[in-house]
Image (spheres, rainbow, N blue to C red):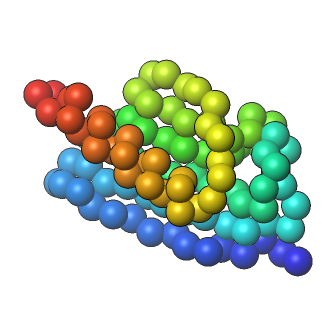
Amino acid sequence: MKAIELFRTRIVYAEHAFAELVLWRVPAPVKGSRHEYKYRLAYVVKGICVVRYDNEVGKGDHRHFGAKETNYSFTTPEALLANFQRDIARWNRENSNS
């Protein structure tokens, strides 16, 4: 089985803010992950990626919130999207004066 792209989309939140979401089903877990998905979710504000979830080969599942990087416990694609949306809302709330 080859990798299958499940979705690729861009969501525009404002003139200066958008999210890009990409999710693939892969034949074997990427190095550092234990599931059959490869993903990259990014929220970009004024040209800067401020929230990102991904499972880069060798690093496994992790998230970036501002300058901080932490491990992420992937469970399902639905939970991944919900967590990402929660972090976008948090970022917007905490940075509404920027």
Q: Is residue 27 above or below residue 52?
A: below
State which quarter of the image contains the C terminus: top left
Q: Is residue 27 left or right of residue 23?
A: right
Residue 70 shows in this picture:
yes
Q: Where does the image place residue 77, in percent across and percent down from the top left?
A: 59, 61
Q: Where does the image place residue 9, in percent across and percent down from the top left?
A: 44, 69
Q: Is residue 26 above or below residue 96?
A: below
State which quarter of the image contains the N terminus: bottom right
Residue drawn 55% across and 36% down?
A: 63
Q: Is residue 13 left or right of residue 25?
A: left
Q: Is residue 19 above or below residue 53?
A: below
Quadrant of residue 6 in the image?
A: bottom right
Residue drawn 85% across and 44% down?
A: 31
Q: Residue furthest top?
A: 68
Front-lying residue, 14 or 95: 95
Q: Is residue 57 above or below residue 6?
A: above
